Image (spheres, grey):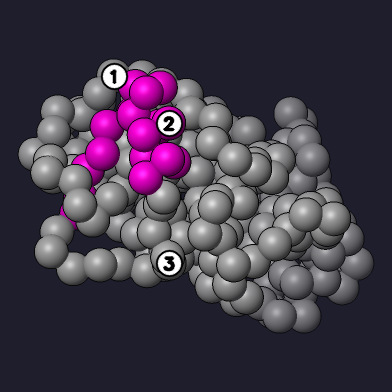
């Protein structure tokens, strides 16, 4: 079984270090971490230390550093996610994190029901907490970024792919583009014709994933899994 991962602000360069605060409380109270057990300690920016616990209580976990890895950043896959209703937003962020998205842009699309305007900071912080928890669970060396709330035509970077049920091209048949990828995921009510036209005018490519219509909270993660799997297959 893979050792649990805990995040700190900075991974120490010397032989020992300590985990404090909420991470220590979670490790001791919820996970019952005890001396002698292996743990991973990361900074969320690619540095991960393989450690052994030397002492543990609710306020501090002391560890011995056995080895340190520098994990290179993965290809940038940014998901522009139309904001789902209620807890489905949390689900979307959790699945996107586990599937390998490097960043998520909360998007107030034309047909988005949930309205973040006036409460962007609190909502974004919630998504950051969800992403952090999911990153720990999936042992990610790099924490995904939750970008600022976008309204109107969303920003795109690199090769942009619109997940759209009426697209003629399949995601599974296109060549994997080089460089950064932006995935655009619309709301349950779908993208408007104007939104699609604006994105296509910016060089985006509309693709579908099959005959079934997926929920907005799961479609992006499914696309991310395909992209990351194809990268592994191609060695890119």
What residue span does the magenta drawing correspond to?
193-209
Q: Is residue 174 magenta?
A: no
Which of the two marks, 3 or 2, is nearer to us in this view? 2
Q: Find residue 86 and report its image quarter.
A: bottom right
Write down the residue under mark 3.
188
Q: Is residue 11 visible?
A: yes
Q: Position of residue 200 (x, y in %)?
A: 34, 29
Q: Is residue 140 visible?
A: no
Residue at screen point 54% across, 36% down: 153
Image quadrant occupied by the N terminus: bottom left
Q: Is residue 223 above or below residue 152?
A: below
Q: Is residue 73 above or below residue 120?
A: above
Q: Is residue 145 above or below residue 203?
A: below
Q: Position of residue 208 (x, y in %)?
A: 20, 50
Residue that protrudes farthest toward the front in the picture: 194
Residue at screen point 42% across, 40% down: 194
Decide: few, some or many residues near mark 1? Use Cα within 10 Å; few <14, some 14-19, many ≥20.
few
Decide: few, some or many residues near mark 2? Use Cα within 10 Å; few <14, some 14-19, many ≥20.
some
With 76 as the anchor, is 136 left or right in this view?
A: right
Q: CA distance from mark 3 to mark 2?
A: 19 Å
Residue at screen point 37% across, 45% down: 193
Q: Position of residue 17 (x, y in %)?
A: 80, 44
Question: Under tag 2, what secondary structure?
Answer: helix
Write down the residue under mark 2.
198
Question: Under tag 3, what secondary structure?
Answer: loop
Q: Position of residue 216 (x, y in %)?
A: 42, 63
Question: Under tag 1, what secondary structure?
Answer: loop
Residue at screen point 30% across, 57% down: 222
Write down the residue under mark 1.
178
């Amino acid at each position: 079984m893979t050792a649990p991962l805990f995040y700190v602000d900075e991974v120490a360069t010397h032989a020992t270090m300590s985990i404090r605060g909420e991470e220590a409380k979670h490790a001791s109270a919820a996970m019952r971490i005890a001396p002698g057990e292996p743990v991973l300690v990361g900074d969320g920016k690619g540095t991960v230390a393989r450690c052994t616990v030397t002492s543990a209580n609710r306020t501090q976990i002391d560890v011995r550093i056995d080895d340190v890895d520098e994990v290179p950043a993965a290809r940038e896959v940014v998901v522009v996610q139309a904001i789902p209703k209620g807890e489905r937003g949390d689900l979307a962020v959790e699945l996107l994190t586990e599937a390998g998205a490097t960043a998520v842009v909360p998007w107030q699309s034309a047909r988005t029901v949930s309205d973040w305007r006036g409460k962007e900071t609190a909502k974004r912080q919630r998504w950051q907490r969800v992403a952090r928890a999911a990153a720990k669970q999936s042992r990610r060396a790099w924490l995904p970024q939750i970008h600022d709330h976008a309204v109107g035509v969303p920003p795109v970077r690199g090769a942009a792919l619109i997940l759209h049920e009426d697209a003629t091209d399949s995601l599974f048949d296109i060549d994997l583009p080089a460089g950064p990828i932006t995935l655009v995921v619309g709301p349950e009510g779908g993208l408007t014709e104007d939104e699609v036209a604006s994105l296509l005018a910016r060089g985006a490519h509309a693709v579908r994933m099959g005959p079934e219509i997926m929920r907005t909270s799961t479609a992006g993660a499914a696309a991310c899994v395909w992209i990351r799997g194809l990268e592994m297959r191609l060695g890119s």
